[in-house]
Image (cartoon, helix red, strand yellow):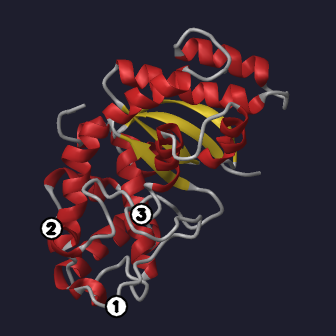
Amino acid sequence: MGADAEIFVFGYERYRAEVVPALVRLLRTGEVVPWLGEVFRRASPEGGYGYGVLWPQLASQLRERPTDLVRYCTWLGPDLRYVGGRRATRAQLTCPSGTRPERGRCRFHRDGDRHAVEELTALHEALVAVFCLGSSQFVGRTVAPAYYLPLLARQGVPDGDPLRELLGALATRGAVWGYRFGVTEGIHGWLTNAETVELAARLDRLDLPRYEPTFAALADVWRRAVGSTDEWQQVSLSFVRTVATIAAGDGRGLLWGNDVCPDVWRESLGLSEACFPPAVG
């Protein structure tokens, strides 16, 4: 059936201030900060195979074999985005370094524990989905931002244009922590608040369908577009523009996810805002 691709309003500041430090500390020391411990406690054990068992086991393993991303990793940015030199593909990337001191312990190294990577990426997605994502809009089935490249070419957007780079960031920043083991599933990428403002402005210069920048208007346009393949690229990219405009106006970022389902994570893990520190944006 394919994965539902959606563009989300993203609480980037909350992600950067709370989620990223908790994950980095977990990797660096095996320590579980109190609110993350509550997430672990609420997750279902599912007969010993659920995240309520797997995540605490992972923390225990990391206490014995920690990984210091802050000190040694040049492959990930401060917000866990992929910044390596290899071209990001749908295959989840692994670090190829043969010299970094942490390579024998890092879960993301090519010789690392792939099961642990799956548990880490699931944890990252769960925390982002439940605590950092706002409203969203469907933009296509089993698509990624590269879907818009032919449209950009037709509208005369040159190679190297910042618009292409911003859409590229939505496609590849999640290549390590966001991509899941599947065809297109997972968090593909995200933009900071400032980048979201820029993306909205640059998309607004293109010849795309015009309507009020509200989710109500998005729903109406989507209903009228269902079942029609004519001009779908333009309609879909106009959805990205509109959600970016809404997010920018609210001081938020933007995130592209395929089958990233906040409601499913909340239900399956029993999570709510009550588990989390006060919002920081």
> Between marks 3 and 2, how big is the CA–CA gap?
17 Å
Q: Residues within 10 Å of mark 1 (few under 14, many from 20)?
A: few
Which dot, 3 or 1, sits closer to the camera?
1
Q: Nearer the viewer, residue 253 or 114?
A: 253
Q: Residue at x 63, y 48 (%)?
A: 146
Q: Amino acid at mark 2?
A: Glu
Q: Which residue is mark 2?
A: 31
Q: Where is mark 1, residue-wise?
A: 98
Horizontal and vertical percent for residue 171? 53, 51
Left or right for 159, reference 223: left
Taking the view exactly as shown, the residue that stands out farthest to the top is 212
In-image side of 19 versus 84 (left or right): left
Q: Can you give x and y, in whole percent of width and height, for residue 151 in the image?
A: 71, 36
Residue appearing at x 49%, y 56% in the figure:
172
Q: Which residue is mark 3?
A: 121
Question: Can you say whether 156 is above or below 103 in the image?
Answer: above
* Label located before the other in sequence (3 or 1): 1
Q: Secondary structure at mark 2?
A: loop
Q: Residue at x 38, y 42 (%)?
A: 130
Q: Quadrant of residue 145?
A: top right
Q: From the image, state whether disc 3 or disc 2 is nearer to you.
A: 3
Categorize mark 3 by other alpha carbons within 10 Å: few (<14), some (14-19), many (20+): many
**Kind of residue at badge 3:** Thr
Q: Is residue 38 left or right of residue 85?
A: left
